[in-house]
Image: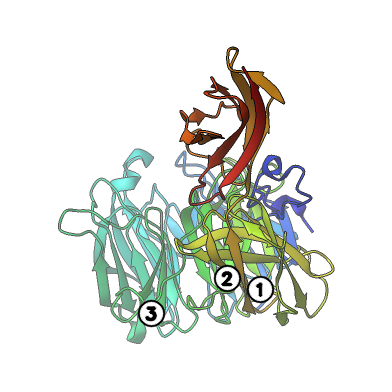
């Protein structure tokens, strides 16, 4: 297993310093999973333009655009489904951009600077379909409705590509045809089931409110169906498109929006789906999206730094709460992020192919990821317990339990999620690692007196099904306080009395220093003396001039507050003249 995919992030509910001396341990775990099987190939390219998959012959094609100079030759690297490079195809003084594979897997189509070529997917023999309008920026290719569709940007230099006027063309029954559909920027194409095709527009200086549209490509024609722009009346919310994909059944469309994250739409009218996907992790910017051909999974690729996941593989059903597999790509063995438009699945959903790049964008890697094919049951066994037995506001509390799981031992430890619900609402306590024997410990510091209900959940992952939640209610009491006094056995009325003391409070720190009430009782009666404020170190002094001889009793009290019990202490002094 490539451990470089494991997140370096640790999640703990309390710091080690806070728990020092309590006998509790921090329940921490890596935030990201690693796939059961993952192969990585370093790609022989210096720029990236397209990824295509031949499911018939189990081939993966990765194109190097190389558009910096008009006579540059492009590269198509060819791999098998295990990530082994089979060959490298080099174009002749023509950069290569878009790729598409024919429905029967016999042909690989490649969009070049001045032509579109076809390669036999077994012999790699090359034929020119047609010479077309010269392209400086790079083409998109898609096969839909039995025809090949491609874009033709019009720009005299690469500096014009972002805002160039781009035509949608096609080979319709073998004839190069201009469809008449056009707009500004590097228009993206994506074929889908049922003779449908997506076209999306990246944001650019000439497209402040970009569009996405669904086309019907049946009957050797192209007819626009649904279309949508996203900005509101004030111009906010415009699409920032990086990738687009049809679901396996064609009923949904997913967009990788660098501003909004993953948008899920209904394909018939491009309205927002009733249930969308949860946001990407904080710090991750959407860049790629792909549905598996078997309809089970969606892969969401992103650009992120540090321990924030760059790739999530999760159930395609947005209502399924199964936790995703998360991948963190860091450094020279992985790349640092998923490239836009850099993911494709095998038709049976057994493999995800993802292209990553480094921060500078000059090196590239191909990852072959195999999601688990089987899910196993999980269950909580027995009741949750807690220690110490008397929970106290502001002090550490450990909630313990056990989770059983069927099937083989997981590659990464399972994690449970915990919350505390009290009079202030529900509070997220993060995750706790499940040990090899199934036990786990959730650490908390309740901060309210009263009942606190702990709920522990296992959301599942791509290998394990979710477990039914388990709850446990704890009565949280006030933290104890104490007062101690040191007084002389005898004193005189002329010299006065000095009593020293110490006040301690467990639990949450007091918002202000404690103010103590001091009462003196002697043979003349009872009277209240001036109050005393406790010093920062908990100490205090009481000075008094007795009013009469014989026994005098000094009682010091603190009334307590919302989180702390009150306390008192007394000292008796014999007073001489």
Gap in angstroms between the C-alphas marked 2 and 3: 25 Å
Marks 2 and 3 close (CB-CB < 8 Å): no
| Quadrant including the N terminus | bottom right
* Other-residue count near label 3 (Cα within 10 Å), few / some / many at <14 / 14–19 / ≥20: many
Q: Residue at x 68, y 61 (%)?
A: 390
Looking at the image, which is closer to me, 284 or 11? 11
Q: Secondary structure at mark 2?
A: strand
On screen, residue 96 versus residue 327, left or right, reads left
Residue 350 percent location from the top left of the image: 67, 75
Q: Which mark, residue 196?
A: 3
Residue 262 percent location from the top left of the image: 43, 63
Residue identified by numbered label 2: 314
| Quadrant including the C terminus | top right
Residue 213 percent location from the top left of the image: 30, 70
Q: Is residue 161 above or below residue 456?
A: above
Reading the chain from its start, which is encountered first: label 2 or label 3?
Answer: 3
Mark 2 or 3: in front is 2
């Amino acid at each position: 297993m490539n451990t470089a995919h494991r997140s370096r992030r640790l999640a703990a509910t309390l710091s080690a310093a806070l728990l020092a001396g309590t006998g509790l341990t921090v329940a921490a775990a890596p935030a990201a999973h690693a796939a059961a099987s993952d192969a990585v190939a370093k790609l022989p390219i210096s720029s990236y333009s397209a990824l295509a998959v031949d499911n018939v012959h189990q081939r993966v094609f990765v194109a190097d655009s190389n558009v910096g100079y008009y006579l540059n030759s492009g590269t198509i690297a060819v791999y098998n489904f295990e990530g082994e490079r089979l060959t490298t195809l080099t174009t002749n003084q023509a950069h290569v951009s878009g790729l598409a594979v024919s429905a029967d897997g016999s042909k690989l189509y490649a969009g070049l600077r001045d032509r579109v070529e076809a390669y036999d997917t077994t012999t790699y023999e090359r034929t020119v379909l047609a010479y077309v309008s010269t392209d400086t920026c790079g083409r998109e290719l898609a096969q839909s409705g039995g025809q090949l569709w491609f874009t033709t940007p019009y720009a005299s230099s690469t500096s014009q590509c972002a805002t160039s006027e781009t035509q949608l063309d096609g080979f319709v029954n073998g004839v190069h045809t201009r469809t008449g559909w056009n707009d500004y920027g590097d228009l993206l194409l994506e074929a889908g089931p049922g003779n449908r095709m997506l076209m999306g527009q990246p944001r650019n200086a000439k497209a402040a409110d970009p569009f996405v549209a669904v086309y019907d490509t049946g009957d050797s024609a192209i007819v626009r169906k649904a279309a949508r722009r996203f900005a509101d009346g004030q111009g906010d919310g415009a699409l920032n498109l990086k990738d687009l994909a049809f679901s396996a059944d064609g009923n949904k469309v997913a967009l990788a929006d660098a501003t909004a994250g993953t948008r899920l739409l209904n394909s018939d009218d491009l309205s927002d789906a009733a249930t969308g996907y949860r946001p990407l992790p904080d710090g991750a910017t959407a860049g790629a999206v792909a549905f598996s051909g078997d309809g089970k999974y969606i892969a969401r690729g992103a650009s992120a730094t540090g321990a924030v996941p760059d790739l999530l593989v999760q159930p395609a059903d947005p209502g399924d709460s199964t936790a995703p597999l998360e991948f963190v790509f860091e450094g020279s063995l992985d790349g640092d992020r998923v490239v836009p438009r850099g993911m494709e699945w095998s038709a049976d959903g057994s493999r995800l192919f993802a292209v990553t790049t480094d921060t500078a964008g000059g090196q590239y890697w191909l990852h072959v990821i195999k999601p688990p094919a089987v899910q196993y049951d999980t269950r909580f066994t027995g009741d949750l317990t807690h220690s110490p037995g008397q929970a106290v506001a502001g002090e550490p509390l450990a909630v313990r339990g056990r989770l059983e799981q069927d099937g083989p031992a997981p590659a990464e430890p399972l994690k449970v999620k915990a919350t505390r619900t009290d009079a202030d609402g529900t509070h997220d306590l993060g995750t706790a690692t499940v040990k090899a024997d199934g036990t786990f410990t959730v650490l908390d510091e309740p901060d309210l007196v009263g009942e606190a209900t702990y709920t522990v959940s296992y959301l599942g992952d791509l290998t394990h099904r979710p477990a039914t939640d388990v709850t446990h209610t704890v009565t949280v009491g006030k933290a104890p306080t104490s007062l101690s006094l040191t007084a002389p056995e005898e004193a005189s009325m002329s010299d006065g009395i000095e009593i020293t003391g110490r006040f301690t409070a467990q639990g949450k720190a007091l918002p202000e220093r404690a103010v103590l009430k001091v009462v003196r009782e002697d043979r003349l009666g009872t009277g209240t003396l001036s109050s005393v404020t406790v010093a920062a170190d908990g100490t205090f002094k009481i000075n008094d001039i007795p009013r009469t001889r014989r026994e005098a009793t000094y009682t010091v009290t603190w009334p307590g507050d919302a989180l702390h019990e009150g306390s008192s202490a007394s000292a008796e002094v014999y007073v001489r003249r």
